[in-house]
Each structure stands twice: as C-alpha cells, then as structure tokens.
C-alpha cells in the first residue's frame, strides 16, 4: 500500500500526500493541501473528514445529506488544481481554483474557486463559486490518468 497513487493526482504516493491528513490526522499546511485532501476524501468516501474540514458556519443537516448523496452517486476520476493563493494581506484566508472530473453515469466536471479560512491553525472549506466548464484538448491526455488520449478515453462519454 505504501506506493499507492494518491487519488488527488499529486506526484507522491497516498501516504506521503493526502494520507498524512486523512489517515494520520495531520493538518494541512496550505489551502491547496486541504483542497486536495478533501478531494481524496470524496474518492475514498470519508464523510467524517469532509465534515471536520467544513467551516463550522457551513455545517447543517442539509450539508450532511448533501455530502452523503454525493458520496453515493459520484465517481471521481481526476483532479486538476488550476491555481491557489492567499487573500491579500491575510494569513488565515485562502482560495483554490480547481476542476474535479467525474464519470458516472455520464462525464461531468466541477470547475470551482473555493474559499478556505484558517481557525486555530486548521484550514477549513467555506464555500465555492462555480466557474464555466473548461475545454479539454481532444488529443491531450485524459483527465483520468489512463495515459490514453482524451478523445479515446472519457472524452467519448456522454456529457463530455
Ligand atoms: Zn493527494
Ligand atoms: Zn479517461
């Protein structure tokens, strides 16, 4: 298991990447690390981690049922972090722009700019703004990491 690839697509294996936070209870040092670990938690069905990394102001019964529904239905196939940064002059507020890809039943993507706040040293997800779908290069590599061309892999799926 030591060399298991991290679901977030990071260059390191799971244990050295998001596993530090998911399995070992470590705390993400940047908004990007937290965002990646939350994506990995979605892939691995770790509801407890998703809830504990939501900002307290956003926790509600609807949040729990919404997350449960997403964990039941979505099949995540890849993540791209487009950019991330800190709000000007703030050490405790950051943002991450990313695209998360899913397949099942059809192909879909979520392009979002998320906001993260840090309280008591812990980064937490606050909310996100949806952005227009990104266009994928038909001859580029598929977002799922199969090594095949997009058009020959998930690019042929309904919704793609
Ligand atoms: Zn990772
Ligand atoms: Zn693919």
Image (spheres, rainbow, N blue to C red):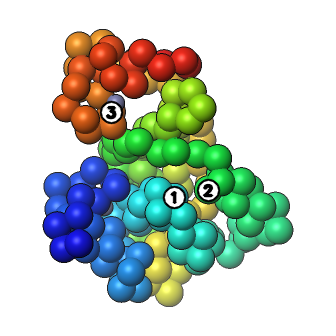
**Which quadrant is the N terminus positioned in?**
bottom left
Q: Residue 143 got which mark?
A: 3
| Residue 82, above or below 85 | above
Identify the residue at horizontal 28%, vertical 50% (top origin).
9
Count residues near mark 1 (Cα–Cα under 10 Å), then give few for <14, some for 14-19, many for 20+: many
Q: Is mark 1 within 8 Å of ligand 1?
A: no
What element does badge 1 sit on?
A: helix
Residue 72 lies left or right of residue 111; in this view the side is: right
| Residue that badge 2 annotates | 71
Residue at the image position 52 percent from the left and 50 percent from the top: 114
Q: Is residue 128 above or below residue 12?
A: above
Residue 71: quarter of image: bottom right
* Residue identified by numbered label 1: 42
* Earlier residue among tags 2 and 1: 1
The image shows residue 85 at horizontal and vertical percentages of 35, 53
- Decide: marks 2, 1 in contact (CB < 8 A)? yes
Classify the position of ligand 1 by quadrant: top left, top right, bottom left or bottom right.
bottom left
């Amino acid at each position: 298991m030591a060399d298991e690839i991290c679901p977030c697509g990071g260059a390191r294996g799971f244990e050295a990447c998001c596993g530090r936070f998911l399995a070992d209870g470590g705390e993400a040092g940047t908004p990007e690390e937290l965002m990646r670990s939350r994506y990995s938690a979605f892939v691995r069905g770790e509801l407890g981690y998703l809830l504990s990394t939501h900002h307290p102001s956003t926790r509600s019964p609807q949040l729990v049922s919404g997350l449960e529904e997403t964990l039941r239905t979505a099949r995540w196939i890849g993540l791209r972090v487009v950019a991330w940064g800190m709000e000007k002059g703030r050490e405790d507020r950051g943002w991450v722009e990313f695209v998360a890809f899913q397949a099942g039943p059809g192909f879909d993507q979520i392009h979002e700019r998320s906001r993260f706040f840090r309280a008591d040293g812990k980064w937490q997800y606050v909310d996100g703004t949806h952005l227009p779908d990104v266009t994928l290069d038909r001859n580029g590599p598929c977002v799922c990491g199969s090594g095949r061309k997009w058009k020959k892999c998930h690019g042929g799926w309904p919704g793609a």
